[in-house]
Image: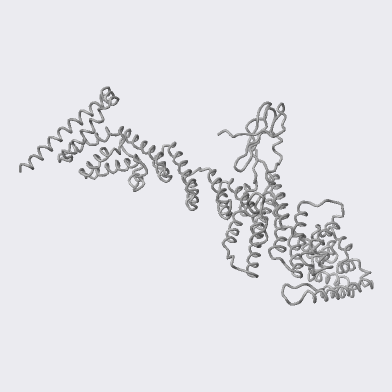
Amino acid sequence: AAVPTQVVPGADPSARQLCFAWGPAEVLVCETRFGRAGGSRSPSRSRSRALTGSVADTGEGAPGSSRVFVVRRDQDIYIQTLRKLFNESHGIFMGLQRSEEELAGKSRKAQLVQVSKNYRSVIRACMEDMHQAAVSTRDPALQGQYSTQVSILSAMELIWNLCEILFVEAAAAGPLLLRLLDWVRLHVCDVDSMVREVLSSENPSKHKLFWNVVDVFVLQGRMDEARHLLSKEVTANPTSMNMYKILDDLMKKMPMPSLGNTQTLTELELKWQHWHEECQRFLQDGTFASNPHMESICKILVGDEDAILEKKELMTTWYHFLVTRLLYSHPTVKPMELRFYAQSSMDLFLGGESSPEPLDMILMAAFEFEMHQVIKECSIVLSNWWFVAHLTDLLDHCKLLQSHNLYFGSNMREFLLLEYASGLFSHHSLWQLGVDYFDHCPEFGRVYLELHIERIPLNTEQKALKVLRICEQRQMHEQVRSICKIMAMKALRNNRLGSALSWSIRAKDAAFATLISDRFLKDYCERGCFSDLDLIDNLGPSMLLSDRLTFLGKYREFHRLYGEKRFPEAARLLLTLMTAHIAPCSFWMTLLTDALPLLEQKEIIFSAEQTYELMRCLEDLTAGNADKQKFQEDDVETTKVEMLRLALARNLARVIVKEGTVEGS
């Protein structure tokens, strides 16, 4: 079908024009008049989504030719390695919708935190699969694509984990720092390879990366591991034993928050203040002056920002610097104080040398507890709707987005779920997941589902039955009829009359059932037998859908009775079909011809009254001017009429004789 196109506003009519047409899940873009539409390869945006184009060429790009490009909204849906993300997260989403809303307090929060962790585990599993694919492929283009996806998934997990700590778990002062330390250790600075390299060397303390590893452990608050490495330094350099013991003791005694209720924040602050003063004393006394590395570590312990910033290359990010800074200067930081430390940490770390990246702005919005800004920025930056749809749904279950409605009617959760599910419907198999997402959008989900399900290509009967079952389960009667009509028409075009009749009955389409019944009768007239006997024999109450279908079913029943030699029943049924005017007039001659063998039976089948009815039907058939002319011109039809008249007259004579004999006796 022709697709209406629009010209980009403001285009010069004398020059090349970029035309476009919206589809259900993509945009068709073409450049008219001259040259190739190379410009349409660049990403464009639709509803703040990054669009990536897959190109369908229609020509060689010669002057005057036009090329068409398909620009998809959610290209990620077509990446095979991301299928796990969509499929497995669907199960988590459905479990969350079915979960007991009655759970309150800590039990409900624990449940939501577990759901969040499940989502993160799926992201991580996909990231590992993508990394493996990048390593194993030899195609540079594919390798670049996989590496990009690994970076995106890594950023998604980083953001999600921070949102889990701040919004879902809502960690309080004390435990908050422990959670942020775990976040940094998991996402920001992976030192495992560096540690393995140092420990596997012959003399670890002499390795060029030895102090880097120690510093990283200290920066991440991994004191036990840092102390273990420092012990190797003392073994190699006994002269530093005294300094080592003092530093080791300071690191060992460092107060840390606990996840349990073993100490109050006031107790922690007093212990930490005492420990902090002790560290400062040793530093001011010059205890570590002869060993710059140990002195640097002690400066970090007292929270010296300049000393921490000297390790910028080891931390790599401003949010690592933020967590380290909090650990050694303000371990009892409260959630609402994070925004101030986050902003100053980013300013100090970047130092005007570079501007914040989009990821930095998203994390900053999270530290400022601007949930809606986090969702907005992620919607703009990330390449699909999956992340924002599932995160928003989770936050909504945490009762954190209840007051935020959009100006065009739907709330944010539903809007994002609708967008994500709409993208799924553009995929040949993932559309089935989209159905469940629409089901859980109470305001507009039903409308969206009705619109999208009509656009699913019904390539096979199996797929059509699957779509039909979904519609029937949701009482979508219009869509059921539409699907059945489409499949009936396809079957009819392929001359599969049985399938076409079955679909038309399912659609309860009387007109189409009549049309197909006529085709069955026409085929019978041409071939002398019925196809799809099983279907016709088992029509049951469905035959009442239309008169023609009723006739088809009853006419087939006549043949069955005749085949079983139940001649009187067959004769009564045949006569009923004609006298009740169920049979089409065009088929009367066939019915009368079917009566011939019954009229010629040795046993009298038709009574006198029935014979008179057959005679009347024959005369009615031949009485019309058009039919009369037809019978006069067609020798075969004329012969049939004469044979019928003779057989009817003979049968009537036999009946009269028999009935007279019976009366006489």
Looking at this view, is 602 or 243 the one in front?
Answer: 602
Task: Using the rendered view, name the quadrant where residue 637 is placed.
Answer: top left
Q: How is the image coloured?
A: one colour
Quadrant in the picture for the N terminus: top right
Residue 36 appears in the figure: no
Quadrant in the picture for the C terminus: top left
Q: Is residue 288 left or right of residue 264?
A: right
Task: Using the rendered view, name the quadrant where residue 90 is placed.
Answer: bottom right
Q: Is residue 541 left or right of residue 64?
A: left
- Counting from the top left corner in percent of width and height, residue 463 is at 50, 47
Classify 546 as above or below 247.
above
Looking at this view, is 77 or 169 the one in front?
Answer: 169
Q: Residue at x 25, y 31 (%)?
A: 620
- Counting from the top left corner in percent of width and height, residue 546 is at 36, 41
Classify 314 as above or below 26.
below
Looking at this view, is 403 or 432 the one in front?
Answer: 403
Looking at this view, is 405 or 643 the one in front?
Answer: 405
Q: Residue at x 71, y 35 (%)?
A: 39
Q: Is residue 55 left or right of residue 262?
A: left
Please identify the residue farthest to the top as the structure is shown.
633
Classify 379 as above or below 176.
above
Task: Using the rendered view, name the quadrant where residue 514 is placed.
Answer: top left
- Counting from the top left corner in percent of width and height, residue 331 is at 80, 69
- Counting from the top left corner in percent of width and height, residue 40 is at 69, 37
Question: How many discs mark residues in the rendered view?
Answer: 0
Residue 179 appears in the figure: yes
Please identify the residue farthest to the left as the structure is shown.
665
